[in-house]
Amino acid sequence: MVSINQRLDAETLVLVAEEFGYKVEFVTAELSEEIEQQEPDREEDLVERPPVITVMGHVDHGKTSLLDNIRNTNVIAGEAGGITQHIGAYSVKLENGRRITFLDTPGHEAFTAMRARGAQMTDLAIIIVAADDAVMPQTKEAIAHAQAAGVPMVFAINKIDKPGANPDTIRRQLSEMNILVEDWGGKYQCQEISAKKGLNVDKLLEKVLFETDLLELKANPNKMGSGAVIESSLDKGRGYLATVLVQDGTVHVGDVIISGAYYGRVKAMYNERGQKVESAGPSTPVSLLGLNGAPAAGEKFNIMADEKEAKSIAQRREQLIRIQGIKTQKHLTLEEIGRRIAIGNFKELNIIVKGDVDGSVEALSDSLIKLSTEEVRVNVIHKAVGAISESDVLLAEASDAVIIGFQVRPSAEARRAAEKEGIEIRLYSVIYDCINEVKEGIEGMLEPEKKEEVTATAEVKQTFKISKVGTIAGCLVKEGKLTSKADVRLIRDGIVVYTGSLSSLQRGKDQAKEVPSGMECGCGLDRYNDIHPGDVIEAFQIVEIKRSL
Ligand code: GDP
């Protein structure tokens, strides 16, 4: 039984409507779709466009140095002088006359945040790894994000000028992730470089162009422009300033532009050097003035012929966005997948696995992949050691994935983001439980009878060693209510180090039954003394939850 206030998902709507002999037509707040498609391009109108490249990698592996080197050695837009403005993207012209557009996003989180909004801006990702270091967690994340986006990768092994550099170690570590570089007989191009000394950067760019040439990137500059927003801001004197990447067609000053729920006439456009330009063609980044708001990064934009129409679409979208906000977010959950199978179509279950040690992450991922059946394929799109981060949640959102944490916890930001986006995070302490639940989910019979609910969190401020008693932790209760009977976990840097119960709970000198948030207390853990300041005590209870769809 469904109540009158409940929203149905698309598939159910279709089924119900069909019962009554109606057809369902879906409208969408998805932006470009309601805008009338321009005529399909004729082959002869298409011209080659420059590739759009993003550089990603672990912090300090040389991303900034590489971009700076490329910017300084390659004359920009055919004129002398460096780039003075930071606009999040710029176009460089190589010695051979070819152009490349670089997107300078703050990291792979931003890359995926944009993708989550539907914009696929990047044609190719350069993954930079320092040869005096190793393939690091963020390197793996960057690779996972690029792979999830289906973007080809070229590897830059950086800092080869350093005495401790060992590029082969990097190649080996990549091969362990099933990424075989070309010189090892694989399909991924790879170039040893020194970003600082500018060594081999030209060769790297050659390889990049070789890869992007295979993509045969083309666009039609003789139509109304469209593309995506890279960043936007409110400039005090000038109004809303949006940096956009034109992906197809051409944008001219004076055009009517719409992006998300905002629209306006392009008043002025500037290139990466802050110079005014009159028009911008495919793969060109520009900052433009004239929108009546700041669209989000990754939002698509279109040029329209008629200002009135743009206005009415913008208003409709605003309304849709508002309705969407009210509607509960719904992403694929284990229950959902079971239900969909009941309806009878093939599904993929994307999973992100985070764990406390590499061994269990690997073991769990392998076991989960083996659960794939004819109707359901299980994809582990990302696996890593460490706490569940906001970036994991973004990746889950973009790829419609479930996050599984084994003996790890989400950070506060990650938990908030997951709640907001409706991303399912499942936490386990026993591999077997996890495999079983996913299996049941796949078999369409998951009954989430019992779920864990966190009832309180407390931060350890100080510890006291008391003879015959053990370590007492002086804590501040941050959330919820800590009760003396609660089951608890001790969490250090996002990793569960102890699970058990409280041996004592005191407020001041007195025993306490419960301590509310904001209050300080002292507590001991049952048969466990290795407590450090900064640890978090998490109290939880097992609650029964009815199956819901
Ligand atoms: P990012 O965090 O990835 O943007 O890394 P940066 O470009 O800021 O580089 C981090 C540090 O590594 C800086 O101190 C750079 O000078 C240094 N670095 C970057 N590339 C090279 C290189 O090719 N060789 C050497 N020796 N140092 C480099």
Image (cartoon, helix red, strand yellow):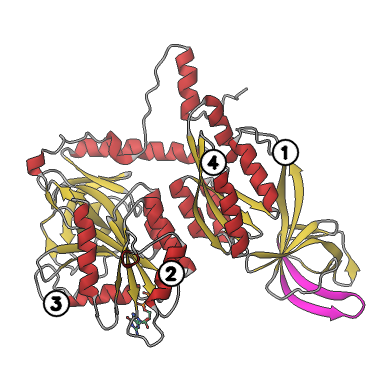
Residue 372 - label: 4
* Corner quadrant of residue 199: bottom left
Measure how far apart labels 1 and 2 are at the Cα level.
45 Å
Front residue of 127 and 467? 127
Q: Is residue 404 visible?
A: no
Q: Disc 2 marks which residue?
A: 172
Front residue of 323 and 483? 483
**Amino acid of disc 2:** Arg
Q: Which label lies toward us, 1 or 2?
A: 2
The relative height of residue 440 versus residue 21 in the rendered view (above or below) is below
Label 4: how many Cα within 10 Å (few below 14, some 14–19, many 20+) = some
Measure how far apart labels 2 and 3 are at the Cα level.
41 Å
Please provide the residue range marked out in magenta.
460-478
Is residue 31 toward the left or the right of residue 359 in the image? left
The relative height of residue 122 versus residue 79 in the rendered view (above or below) is above
Measure how far apart labels 3 and 1 are at the Cα level.
66 Å
Residue 81 - label: 3
Q: Which label lies toward us, 1 or 4?
A: 4
N-terminal of the two: label 2 or label 4? 2
